[in-house]
Image: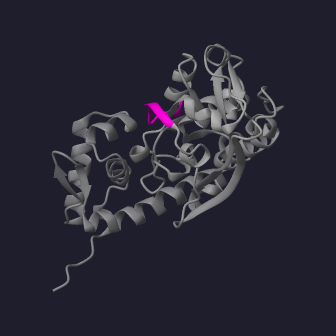
Amino acid sequence: MQKDPTPLSALNWDDLKFFLEVARTRKASSAAKRLSVDYTTVSRRIASLESALGTLLFEKSRSAGFVVTREGQRLLGYAESIESTLHMACEQVSGSSMALSGHVRMGCTEGFGSFFITPQLSHFVEAFPAISVDILPLPHFISLSKREADIVIALERPEHGPYVCCKLCDYRLRLYATQDYLNRHTPITQVSDLRQHPFISYVDDLAFSSELLYLNNLIPGAQAHLRSTSVIAQYTATLQGRGLAILPCFLAAQDPRLVAVLPNEIEVTRQFWMYCREDLRTLKRITLLWDYIRQVTEANEGLLSGESREMRFAQQ
């Protein structure tokens, strides 16, 4: 026998906000921090929602935290639609000054996020002080489905999902070393000379994208004596003058301590893709930041390709 549907009067709509945060973070403590309340408030709100709906929304696990049940997963889709509709409704009924405010979280690859996007965002928030931005420059995949970010810049285009996506840019990587390293080691005049030199590279089986595994393709037989999952760690190690590394030009070309080695022979081109959820793309603060990132990326084509050492900023 099918149970009667829950009357709307039994629901506290505000409880959905707590449900969304726990579903995304899987921790009541993390949800509490994001909502600026204490842990017990989150637990009480979730219990209230489960009681009103007459169903269990989370399974609690010591290792995995709050795991969404099948019924919770069904509610999650509807709750996210309600959240997106409320965002759009607020923009439609508020004035233009209110529309150009709010919060945006941007996820990005570690090197690009740290050395290009972060400097650009510092100018963005100065021009639009009512919009706050979180930048997440991380050496791993960032999930839009879990709302870990509103906009993501990644090495690969998402294969499926309710996303709006565009190719942001091409960027080039080259082989770099310090001048001190080059002075102290066997001269490098051709690719075959590189077999005598130590390299700094990725940990192959821990790289979060196959797009990062370019060393052996470019330099067969290359020996990486120091490896890291972090491109920033590789960059830092290269500055110590103990090896060579393939680094993004937007990172290494800005540093006068590094010299490109065989730049016309050792280079690789990759792409960055930018995407966000369809239901967020029309929000004015998302559109503003999206267009800004595209503008400053186009203005820095020279830096991204390794033809310039200087970063350019948008004229507001």
In x, y percent, where is residue 200?
A: 51, 31
Asked if residue 4 shows in the view, the reply is yes
Query: For residue 170: magenta?
Result: no
| Residue 22 or residue 254, whichever sits in front | 254
Asked if residue 121 shows in the view, the reply is no
In x, y percent, where is residue 265?
A: 73, 41
Q: Is residue 268 above or below residue 241?
A: below
In x, y percent, where is residue 289?
A: 68, 43
Residue at 41% of width from left, 65% of height from top? 77
Is residue 116 rendered to the left or right of residue 54? Answer: right
Q: Is residue 217 above or below residue 262?
A: below
In x, y percent, where is residue 131?
A: 63, 35
Q: In this view, which residue lies farthest toward the bottom?
A: 1
| Residue 182 or residue 176, whichever sits in front | 182
- The stretch in magenta equals 223-231
Residue at 48% of width from left, 63% of height from top? 81
Query: For residue 225: magenta?
Result: yes
